[in-house]
Amino acid sequence: MDNLMIKVDRVSKQYRLGQIGGTTLREELQRKAAKLLKKEDPTKKIGEKDYEFGETFMALEDVSFEVKKGERLAIIGHNGAGKSTLLKLLSRVTAPSTGGIGLNGRIASMLEVGTGFHPELTGRENVYMNGAILGMTKKEIDKKIDDIIEFSEVRQFIDTPVKRYSSGMFVKLAFSVAAHLDAEIMLMDEVLAVGDMAFQTKCLNKMNDLAKNEGKTILYVSHNMNTVRKLCNRAMVLEHGRVVFNGSVEEGIACYLKDDEDASLHFDFDNAKRPYGGIGDKFRALSLDFLDGRTQFKYNEPIVSRFKFKTECPFKAVRLRAEAYYFDGTEIGNYETDSFEVDSAGEHILNISFMPDILPIGQYYLIINIYEVDLMNNHKVLDQPSQRIPFEIYEDDPTGIRWNHEYMGHVRMGKIKVSDTSF
């Protein structure tokens, strides 16, 4: 099929664990002698695990998928899921243990932006050298050199050694070289997290233009769900080396961000991590329970919960803040109580509720933050358990208009009142 650019058929990749052999003959002899005398390996690093000979790890297992011309596929998953390994297989940095990979076109791999840049060479010299590493001929670079420099926004410094560049200037130039490579397939691993926000937007627009107008096929690995939404039209989720989802972007993001506690009604804070030491000692959040027996709510009904905590001493003015986030991590705002007094040490229960009427249909979570306010209105954090409290708003605007978070945002501001008309 002419428009089929990538076909991955039951690919697996297996690695051996631990260090394979010593770096010198002397270390090998020391290792063998220690093994014969049943002593600890003197060449082993502190804290390094002893692996049995032949112990292996499956980085990818039985992965199959296809990508057509012009598609922009996001490959998402938690750290260690196998995303970078898959891109290395596709770019032929390493070979699969089993299975086959079919490619129809030239590949541009942006796995490590700036690989091959020499600090003593100027920006212009590095453009030619890096372009050659990525597979461009001198004639191709000559043709595109002005576009590369213009896109990178470092024209003023292009004849300055890159050792004097800031980190942002460095990656801007490196990305610009890779983005102008003539290739049908582009593999990108977190490369859009470069430069400032304006340059990131410029990079996204460039990638979208390459895909839509020039028919480039893009495979993009990222933990930034906002860039995934803007760039990709399909998502594949990897988990422990296996494909667990392959479909639409929004469903893929929901699969990736799904928490095992999504359906929980009880949230235990006592053993949750705190962002730094000292907080949670004198005032400690213990738990929160949804009282309605559910975590799904209409936009126009209160969310009622019971908050349990314990204190080592009385407090004059305590406030509880519930920080609200969209499920992809976008911060929405805060729900907050008035100041209340805790008149004695011990365990206490607080019934709390809030109206989610500003929230459109979607999945959200809360982070609890408790702080004390003094007479000068200074805030002192008492406790902040790092525990997500997920919930869902399942009914949207009663007019029947379905909310699109990508284009309409994450907050329903309210109705516009019309006081006078001329029709």
Image (tube, rainbow, N blue to C red):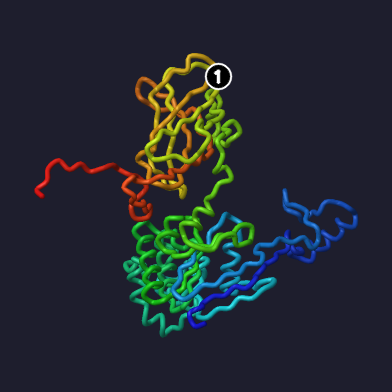
Q: Residue at x 60, y 71 (%)?
A: 89
Residue highlighted by disc 1: 312
Q: What kind of element bears circle 1? A: loop
**In this figure, what is the number of numbered marks?**
1
Q: Position of residue 182 (x, y in %)?
A: 43, 79
Frontmost residue, 399 versus 4: 399
Q: Residue type at mark 1: give it.
A: Glu
Q: Position of residue 109 (x, y in %)?
A: 51, 71
Q: Position of residue 116 (x, y in %)?
A: 51, 70
Q: Is 394 rendered above or below residue 256?
A: above
Left or right of 392? Residue 244 is right
Q: Residue furthest left?
A: 422
Q: Quadrant of residue 151?
A: bottom left
Q: Residue furthest right?
A: 37
Frontmost residue, 109 versus 71: 71
Frontmost residue, 175 versus 334: 334
Residue density around tag 1, few if under 14, some if 14–19, many if 20 or more, within 10 Å: few
Frontmost residue, 310 versus 42: 310
